[in-house]
């Protein structure tokens, strides 16, 4: 039963939401939190840039079919599912939560957990490193464009190019700066991976606290009854199940090996909370941000629990020789 229990970070998210519900920040305190949050997010992407080895990206281009499949699953399959399943998903949630689900569909894949689950399942780990890292980097550009296209079809207004520019300034420029600084601080960042984890989780918790503080002050819990919250869980579960089935049987139909199938399943079905929360803060200024990030938070926990079980089932099978990139 331990694998079904929430991890420490999920418990931290829950406690942060409770804190925002009981002691929401407002006024000058909220403004100060906004500044600190922006700095933490910039530091997060700087450290990610310093951590990502350029050699892995170059080596990974040799298996372009696998990486193209992962990117297609992340940035094509998910948005299509979000739109096609609207008659099923939208009645389960509020319009703002459905907008959060659509935003979830545009996000890049996770990095750490995708690699970890691929390793547990005896998949192609080097390919997972490249695929997940490429997805995270390209998502800085692809996600804002997809959000603009999806929002235009849902009646929630239009995405301004100012928001896209803000994404580049706040996320991509620090990432590039980290890549440039990698030659000097790369080894230090690798040795102090816990620091990156602290900044990663800390920046997310800061955004969640400020987002839910604003949402609580606007009457979030009066507009979110338990039935709607349960509907959101069901909607996320349906979305994840469709993605897992599509990546598993799609990779087999395309002739990938078992190790490559595992990589595609775990990299192509995941969505990044670490990228999603900072992007939501920039892209959805003026929207009820708490409603936007709530689907991502729930999907994060569901995907961890389901993928943990799936990885152990893969690993229990007879291991095969890992194919090269």
Image (cartoon, rainbow, N blue to C red):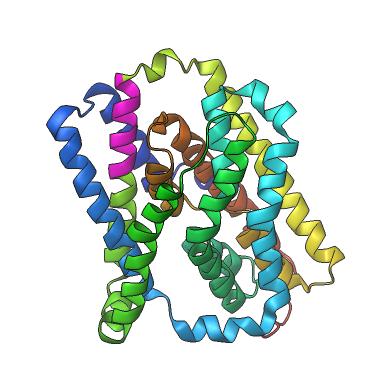
The span shown in magenta is 206-217
Left/right of residue 56 with respect to residue 170 in the rendered view:
right
Instruction: Verify whether residue 214 appears in magenta.
Output: yes
Instruction: Verify whether residue 5 appears in magenta.
Output: no
Left/right of residue 29 with respect to residue 12 in the rendered view:
left
Q: Residue at x 28, y 29 (%)?
A: 20
Pick whichever, 220 or 154, lies toward us. 154
Pick whichever, 121 or 53, lies toward us. 53
Predominant SS of the magenta segment: helix
Pick whichever, 262 or 213, lies toward us. 213
Q: Residue at x 48, y 86 (%)?
A: 55
Q: Is residue 149 visible?
A: yes
Find residue 248 and report its horizontal and vertical position in percent.
76, 58
Find residue 68 and report its horizontal and vertical position in percent.
69, 69
Q: How many marks?
A: 0
Find residue 58 and report its horizontal and vertical position in percent.
55, 85
Q: Residue furthest top?
A: 222
The quadrant holding residue 217 is top left
Q: Is residue 1 visible?
A: no
The quadrant holding residue 316 is bottom right
- Is the residue 59 above or below the residue 150 in the image? below
Q: Residue at x 26, y 79 (%)?
A: 188
From the image, which quarter does the N terminus lie in?
A: top right
Find residue 195 and report its horizontal and vertical position in percent.
26, 65
Q: Residue furthest front?
A: 161
């Amino acid at each position: 039963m331990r694998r079904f229990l929430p991890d420490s970070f999920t418990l931290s998210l829950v406690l942060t939401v409770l804190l925002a519900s009981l002691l929401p920040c407002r006024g000058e305190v909220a403004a100060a939190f906004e500044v600190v949050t922006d700095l933490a997010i910039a530091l997060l992407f700087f450290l990610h840039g310093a951590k990502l080895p350029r050699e892995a990206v170059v080596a990974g281009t040799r298996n372009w079919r696998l990486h193209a499949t992962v990117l297609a699953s992340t940035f094509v399959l998910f948005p299509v599912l979000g739109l096609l399943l609207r008659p099923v998903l939208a009645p389960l949630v509020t319009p703002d939560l459905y907008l959060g689900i659509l935003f979830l569909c545009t996000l890049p894949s996770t990095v750490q957990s995708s690699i970890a689950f691929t390793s547990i399942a005896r998949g192609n780990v080097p390919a997972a490193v490249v695929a997940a890292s490429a997805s995270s980097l390209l998502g800085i550009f692809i996600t804002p464009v997809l959000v603009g296209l999806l929002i235009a079809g849902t009646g929630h207004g239009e995405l301004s190019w100012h928001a896209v520019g803000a994404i580049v300034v706040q996320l991509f420029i620090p990432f590039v700066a980290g890549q440039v600084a990698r030659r000097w601080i790369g080894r230090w960042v690798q040795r102090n991976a816990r620091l990156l984890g602290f900044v990663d989780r800390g920046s997310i918790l800061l955004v969640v606290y400020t987002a839910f503080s604003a949402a609580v002050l606007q009457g979030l819990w009066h507009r979110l009854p338990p039935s709607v919250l349960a509907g959101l869980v069901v909607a996320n579960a349906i979305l994840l199940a469709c993605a897992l089935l599509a990546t598993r049987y799609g990779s087999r139909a395309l002739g990938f090996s078992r190790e490559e199938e595992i990589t595609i399943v775990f990299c192509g079905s995941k969505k990044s909370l670490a990228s999603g929360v900072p992007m939501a803060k920039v892209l959805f200024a003026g929207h009820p941000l708490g409603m936007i990030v709530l689907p991502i938070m729930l999907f994060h926990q569901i995907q961890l629990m389901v993928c943990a079980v799936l990885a152990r089932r893969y690993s229990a099978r007879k291991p095969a020789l890992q194919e090269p990139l």
